[in-house]
Image (cartoon, rainbow, N blue to C red):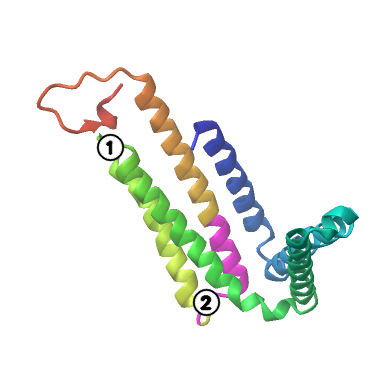
Amino acid sequence: MKAKTALIISSLIMVAGVALTIVYTMEVFTYIIIALGVAFIIPAIVNMVMASTKTSKESENKSAKIQRFSGLISSVGSIIFGVTMIGWSHLYVPFLPMIFGIILILGGSFHLCAMALAFRPTRLPLWLYSMPLVLIAMGFAIIYLENTTLSPQYIVLISGVGLIIFALNAWIELWFMHKIIRTPIKKSSDEEVIDVDAVD
């Protein structure tokens, strides 16, 4: 992934994290489910409109007709699914904590792998590894404590903080990458590891 793309994505994640920490006292779970329902309905409607405007020549083609029919079926299914998410959002709310927890665990694991493999043979400061470990711990806390001590508001707050930590971790990694690329490093023949802290 290019540095510019990574910076844009991490910035969007930061915005999402800050937004969750601001609105965590609201019924965020319900709003998220409704937003996902709308996200299912709109593309399905667009697909149905496009399928209904096919030319008669395309309709005569057997493979095109089968493809259009399957597209219509999937669009109808998406609309029904989206409507149920909007009308009966409370049925889907229990699944969100698991999703949030898995996202944080995957995010922490991603950063650990990136720092352990992508930066080799560079040795990053040990404190930097604490951020993805915190993300993983927060993810497991959401998954295993959601039914006991964590209310939905605190789950949203923890998720927002986790997204902020993820974005900060990404920015720090990009800064170290920029530092490594721009700084000339003299490596001796018997040296195997480059310590970033030792680079001016």
* Direction from residue 103 to residue 31 in the image, left or right: right
Three-letter amino acid code at disc 2?
Glu
Q: Residue furthest left?
A: 190
Observer-side mark, 1 or 2, equals 1
Residue 106 vs residue 33: left or right?
Answer: left
Which segment did they paint magenta?
Answer: 148-161
Q: Main secondary structure of the magenta part?
A: helix
* Residue under label 1: 120
Tag 2 or tag 1, which sits nearer the N-term? 1
Quarter of the image for residue 154 reads bottom right
Q: Give the answer, above or below, for where 192 lies relative to 27.
A: above
- Specify whether 76 is left or right of 119: right
Q: Quadrant of residue 133?
A: bottom left
Q: Is residue 119 left or right of residue 138?
A: left
Count of marks overlaid on the render: 2
x 66%, y 53%: residue = 19
Residue that carries the numbered disc 2 in the rendered image = 146
Q: Nearer the viewer, residue 62 or 167?
A: 62
The label shown at residue 177 is: none
- Where residue 94 appears, as percent x and y from the top left, is 61, 78
- Give the secondary structure at mark 2: loop
Give the residue drawn at x 45%, y 34%.
Answer: 174
Q: Amino acid at mark 1?
A: Arg
Check the picture and name the quadrant holding the C terminus.
top left
Mark 1: secondary structure: loop
Q: Crowdedness of circle 1 by 10 Å Cα count: few (<14), some, many (20+)?
A: few
